[in-house]
Amino acid sequence: MRIKPQTRLIVTSDELLEKNSGFYMASNFEEEEISGEFLIAAPIYKELQWPVQVGEVLRVSYADSRARFECTARVLERVRRDGLDFLRMEPLTEFVRTQRRNDFRLNIELDVKLDQAWEEHGQRRVRRVSGMTIDISGGGAFVRSSIRPAIGEMLVITLPKAQFPGLPRFPCEVRWCFRNDEEKTDLKWNFGLRFVIEVKVKEKLIKQVFALQQQQQQRKQESGL
């Protein structure tokens, strides 16, 4: 498994997502046991511990600087250590790199701009920060930035005009978020974005993503890789 202790996790289940498409809980990886079972911190949702039931099947995911990984695991028991609550998990599948549903994903680093809005003293505030994609598809992107957005928060993303000519700025929803401690960078937060766009915009985006892939393949052929 080779996951470092205290790696940040996102926990959910198909049943929970059916009721609320934005239902993602935060946790930490504690340790892997000889049996192959592993311990995670009791999941937190909106700053409160969620009452996970023994026998419940959960989707457990984490991200590193390369990608996002996910497995399915069953809750075997609740464990309490030094006043802290944990779940002992039985993996039903291995951690595998996830692919966004129905959307081709291109691994590419691109500079993007992110607008984050909030209310302060009755006034709407907006700040623009820089970010970098790790991958992108017609449905969303894996982005790295200096801000830590909340899961479910809405941001506005601006893609680079050179690679995506004619595409407007558009809103996106934060689906998951992890801290990146592996590399020395100011872009400490990795998060997944779901684009909230019209069908025509998505079709145009998909075409441009495929065009970028073709450019990548052509450069590899020319360099002999």
Image (cartoon, helix red, strand yellow):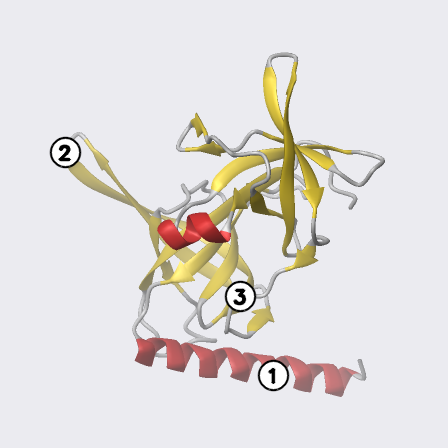
Q: Residue 208, position in %: x, y?
A: 47, 81
Residue tagged by mark 1?
215
In the displayed structure, would residue 71 be above or below residue 30?
below
Tell me how far mark 2 sits from mark 3, CA to CA.
38 Å
> Mark 2 or mark 1: which is in front?
2
**At label 3, which amino acid type do we have?**
Arg
**At label 1, which amino acid type do we have?**
Gln
**Of 163 and 25, which appears nearest the observer?**
25
On screen, residue 115 versus residue 103, left or right, reads left
Residue tagged by mark 3?
100
Q: Residue 46, position in %: x, y?
A: 39, 33
Crowding near the residue tagged with mark 3, few <14, some 14–19, many ≥20 C-alpha atoms within 10 Å: some
Confirm whether residue 7 shows in the render: yes
Q: Secondary structure at mark 2?
A: loop
**Of 205 and 87, which appears nearest the observer?**
87
Tell me how far mark 3 sits from mark 1, CA to CA.
22 Å
Dot 2 or dot 3: first in sequence order is 3
Dot 3 or dot 1: first in sequence order is 3
Please give the name of the residue rendered at 38% of the width and 76% of the height, measured from the top-left corner: 202
**Of 31 and 186, which appears nearest the observer?**
31
